[in-house]
Amino acid sequence: MEFSIKQGSPEKLKGGCVVVGVFEGGKLSTAAQIIDKAAKHALSEFIARGDMSGKSSSTLLLHKLPGVAAERVLLAGLGKASELNSKTSVEILHATFVALNATAAKDATLYIVDEGVGKDAAWVVKQAVFTAAEQAFRADGMKSKPSKPATLKNITFATLDKPSAALKNVLDQTAATARGMALTKELGNLPGNICTPTYLAAKALALGKAHKNIKTTVLNEKDMQKLGMGSLLSVTRGSEQPAKLITLEYHGADKKQKPIVLVGKGITFDSGGISLKPGAEMDEMKYDMCGAASVLGTMQAIAEMGLKLNVVGIIPACENLPSGRATKPGDIVASMSGQTIEILNTDAEGRLILCDALTYSKKFNPDTVIDIATLTGACVIALGHVATGLFSNEDNLAKELLAAGEQAHDRAWQLPLWEDYQSLLDSNFADMQNIGGRAGGTITAACFLSRFTKDYRWAHLDIAGTAWKSGKEKGATGRPVPLLTQYLINRAAAK
Ligand code: BES
Ligand code: MN
Ligand code: ZN
């Protein structure tokens, strides 16, 4: 899908469809007024007849209006101007693209920027690109007869005044972000028998091949053994698939600039191990590598943008399966940090692979480390499927990530990392145990990680509720690629 932005008059633009807004009560947006005038008040007539009320998210498709060059005009209901907010704006954009995709138009020109269908022009453009890309995404490539690709190929954002260079830049960056999300979704949706640790490593190596400023290296189990990653290796023991530790180094700035490190949980299937999960919906544990997939999507996006920043992606990847060799509840292992861990539940495996990857991160002398993980079911209970759980050992970093989430409409919500929770991880036999009980399960998981991140500024994103959808619309969402990419864009701009 191609996106562009240009200045133009709505009645003169040729093409498949031009989209203009109508407010509740039938008040026409400026672009709609221009079309109405050119079409001898045809729009006013449709409104007077009651075919279009301007109700939020309603649409009306019109063909061959006299005096209008485009083949179609789509009226998009904007509701009351005073009631436009992030939720209604996204709904309006969704309804608009559903209506566009129901036509045979190959291209569309949208007048939604000037009129403020959302917070500001940049915000609207971003959400429109994400919505268009989401609806063009196909998840059925493994069916013997996959569905047809979307007909709609070219989206133009049109403005009445000359669009700023900054807005054009936002558009290009968002298109790259959307392609990163598509990669994240594709990988997330792949089943565990295809998307193995080796497969993830191959994808990371391919990213390194495709972008000359990305260098990928892959460590095997022997290498990890030498590094003393006893915690990570304890998770892969039950699996026949070899574990991989994948590193992608993106150099967009001076070599001396400290990198931002992204660490993504890459459990390609989480059965729970000996602490076996119940059977219902266990298939969804193929999504337990969505943190890893979001790192790959974000790395691809920033490489396409040529962001002036150094970023390292680290992906610990393995399966969590039961077998005669598998780690058992009660087993004690030594992590790379030297701290020992009593594994009371083999299903709390994400923290066990992340802790060694977090210790390994120090090697890159990081400015900031952010880990991304489908870590706890408790996070889904706490925040549902709307917000990602956020923890940080530095409040300023938390604020920056929360703000980036708002800007990209890929929001997070901060939870406490207070000392008061740490004692829940006390063990009689080792330095800590890997679970803290049912109460505050998301927080104790973050507390566990915090014991390995004392030497640098760090944040943890628990994406268990936001990385994929269940039920009829089952599929990966591509989150939190928009949040991460926006944060990195902001960091690059601040330099
Ligand atoms: N990958 C799961 C977390 C998860 C569960 C994500 C459901 C999304 C939906 C993680 O490895 C896990 O199993 N966590 C356990 C931790 C518990 C044993 C302390 C959980 O959340 O039940
Ligand atoms: Mn688990
Ligand atoms: Zn897991």
Image (cartoon, grey):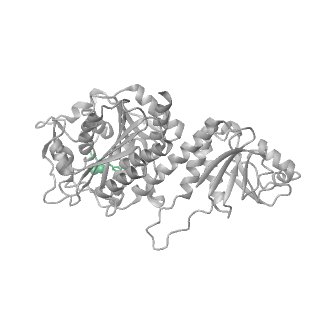
Answer yes or no: is residue 25 visible: no
**For this rendering, which residue is in front, 94 or 362?**
362
Residue 185 vertical placement versus 455 (above, below): below
Give the camera-side residue of 378 and 201. 201
Q: Quadrant of residue 87?
A: top right
Residue 51 location, x and y as percent? 78, 56
User: Can residue 367 be seen in this snapshot?
Assistant: yes
Q: Residue placed farthest to the left in the image? A: 429
Tell me where residue 445 appears, x and y as whole percent: 29, 39
Image quadrant where one finds the N terminus: bottom right
Q: Is residue 435 left or right of residue 397?
A: left
Say left or right for 84 vs 346: right
Query: How many numbered discs?
Result: 0
Q: Vertical placement of 211 versus 341: above or below?
A: below
Viewer-side residue, 492 vs 444:
492
Q: Residue furthest right?
A: 40
Residue 320: quadrant of the picture: bottom left
Name the quadrant containing residue 431.
top left
Residue drawn at (45%, 30%), measured in percent from left and top?
400
Q: Is residue 159 left or right of residue 473?
A: right
- Given residues 35 and 47, the one toward you in this image is 35
Image point (86%, 48%), residue name: 37
Q: Position of residue 245 (x, y in %)?
A: 27, 48
Q: Position of residue 236 (x, y in %)?
A: 21, 53
Q: For the point 66% across and 36% down, which residue is it? A: 164
